[in-house]
Image (cartoon, helix red, strand yellow):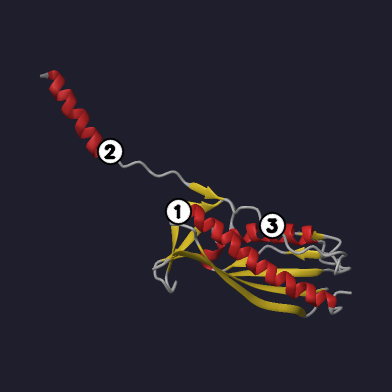
Amino acid sequence: MRLIVLALAAMLLCACSSPSVPDVTYFRLPPPQPLPHADKPLSLLPIEVEGFTGDGIYAEQAMLYATTPDASSLRAYHYQVWSEPPSQGLQARLVELLRESGIAPLVTDRLPASTPALRIHGQIVRYERIKRDSGFVVAVSLRLRVDQDQGEPVLEKTYSAEKAAGDINIEASVSAFAAAIDQVFATFYADLAALERGGHAG
């Protein structure tokens, strides 16, 4: 009888225990696709890429998803997050791409304010995963501005890209994010290179 009571008590404890909390998964973008390499620096000025800004939920680390196909409503995943806030990740990725491209003698994320330079400011406009009838897509939209020597902007434009994920898994969407970001940065690089060839940065 005692064994039956103990068994029933154990069953009650199991029934009343809280469900296990899923592990938090941190996602990192795959390496970027290189930009076209400049045979010689297109700018004599150093380039500073500032940390990207993002309003509201775009400033946080959680991965965002749309609850409607037109992305008019957004939510944040609780257990799928970026390994670093997108504002930092985008800054580091653009620094790496521009540095490897050879567009300027120095590309960095920090310069003294008194140093003559091209300064790139980025704002996250869209950065989300969207469920469509055909599957998942990601939407990336970044507003990029280039200032010279603390003066008037010499380039200011919003760049956008959408990429389809290969399947329903989050990992496929992360790869799609990388492809969309690289497309945006490649278009921005082309505009920046054209600007430099026009002589705006000495």
Q: Secondary structure at mark 1?
A: loop
Observer-nearest residue: 148 or 115?
148
Q: Is residue 184 visible?
A: yes
On screen, 18 above or below 197?
above
Please identify, in this view, whether the residue under mark 1 or under mark 3 is nearer the observer: 1
Q: Crowdedness of circle 1 by 10 Å Cα count: few (<14), some, many (20+)?
A: few
Left or right, residue 16 beside residue 167: left
Observer-nearest residue: 53 or 167?
167
On screen, 179 above or below 196?
above
- Residue bearing mark 2: 17
What amino acid does circle 3 point to?
Ala
Left or right, residue 147 beside residue 31: right
Kindly check if marks 1 and 3 are in contact, taking CB atoms under 8 A apart as contact.
no
Observer-nearest residue: 184 or 61?
184
Q: Quadrant of the N terminus?
A: top left
- Which mark is drawn over residue 169? 1
Q: Secondary structure at mark 3?
A: helix
Position in image of residue 120 (x %, y %): 73, 69
What amino acid does circle 2 point to?
Ser
Kindly check if marks 1 and 2 are in contact, taking CB atoms under 8 A apart as contact.
no
What amino acid does circle 1 point to?
Asn
On screen, 187 above or below 24?
below
Among numbered discs 1 and 3, the one appearing first in the sequence: 3
On screen, 97 above or below 159?
above
Give the quadrant of residue 126.
bottom right
Position in image of residue 130 (x %, y %): 45, 66
- Residue bearing mark 3: 92
- Which mark is drawn over residue 22? none
